[in-house]
Image (cartoon, rainbow, N blue to C red):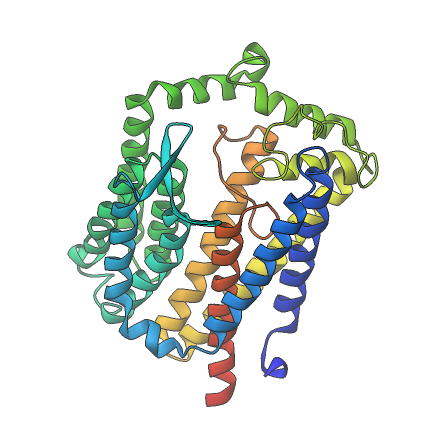
Amino acid sequence: MTGSMDRTLVFSWLVILGLGIVMVASASVAISSTLLLKHGIYVVLALGGLLAVLITPLDWWRQSHRLALVVSLLLCAAVLVPGIGVEVNGARRWIGLGAFSIQPAEVCKVLLLVYLAGYLQRFHDELADRPLALFRPLVMLMLPAALLLMQPDFGSVVVVMTVSVALLFVAGARLRHFLLLVLLGASALGALAQLEPYRMQRLLSFLNPWEHAFSSGYQLTQALIAFGRGEIFGLGLGEGIQKLFYLPEAHNDFIFAVIAEELGLVGALLVIALFALLIVRIFRVGRAALLEGNYFGGYLAYGVGLMLGVQCLVNLGVNTGVLPTKGLTLPFVSYGGNSLIVSCAMIGLVLRLQLERSQHG
């Protein structure tokens, strides 16, 4: 089975996953002695999820793509129900299951990719000439997006809609239709940002974080200090200072700043190179499937690459001050069970596609 897989893809994914374990251990040293153990359990669960996806035929996902949309809607709605959804810091984003909790936004990312891939397979020949076929899936995606906004989870909405529009372009949407979608999407996101004062505050502090260094710009300024301290080769693994209660979410959303401080510019660039290699290899699998006429598998693989790539770019942009502060994890690296399990499940889908291609070949 392993001989049928892209070894470069698997290698880059495993190195990133291993790096995540090491960096979570380093970043959490001052927070909790049990956090690394929990992360280790999440890694085992994520590998189990990958194997479960790997042994499931892609045809099962294709036949269930409409059901995937329904399940995503039910999960996003359930989290808003008192007694089911768990509220933390004013946000209701988790469904408690004892020692573990489900974050519907993370699960929805892979379910919506399955739905989109199934839709694009059915209407592949109509996307270029029938604008209605192009806009219909976006209208359907607005339903879970609205539920995500009610949690509120603005970041997940941005990622899901960005990936959806990009995937439609890959599927053959005309450039003028694509640009219209980008314009409409940007306008909608801008309007949503203005509706909530805290979102506008983040935008303002992002433009000049040092002016808000002890309020809304605190996380970004501390991250930038970590980058400055790391210089070229870093302070050394485990030697970072910012993770010691200066940088909030050092083991989660801002773990890339810890990497930059301890491994320096060289280490940070190597991490970026690993992600770039992984995503390019995923795109390569998707392109090969499309050339063979396997539209569901091809669009699903492209969707996985886009989802991981966009989330990676957003996280790196937030850490470096290129984008406004937003709580999105760095795939495979940040602490967090839901993100890790879903991200590994996405890799499982790509590996399953390649396995089926080699069997049929």
Residue at horizontal 41 percent and vertical 59 percent from the top? 303
* Residue 181 placement (x, y as % from top left): 28, 44
* Residue at the (75%, 38%) spot, across then down: 265
315, above or below 207, in the image: below
Asked if residue 352 lies left or right of residue 252, the reply is: left
Compare residues 297 and 85 and report the one nearer the observer: 85
Number of dots carrying numbers: 0
Q: Which quarter of the rendering shows the N terminus?
A: bottom right
Percent position of residue 100, x then y:
47, 50
**Residue 324 at x, y percent in the picture:** 48, 28
Q: Name the quadrant containing residue 11.
A: bottom right
Horizontal placement of 280 versus 129: left or right? right
Q: Is residue 284 visible?
A: no
Q: Is residue 55 left or right of residue 246?
A: left
The residue shown at (56%, 45%) is 330
- The percent coordinates of residue 168 (x first, y second) are 32, 56
Q: Nearer the viewer, residue 51 or 98?
A: 98
Image point 49% across, 40% down: which residue? Answer: 328
Task: State the residue in front, 233 or 218.
Answer: 218
Tell me which corner region of the image, top left, top right, bottom left or bottom right, holds residue 17. Answer: bottom right
Q: Nearer the viewer, residue 93 or 231?
A: 93
The single residue placed furthest to the front in the displayed view is 98
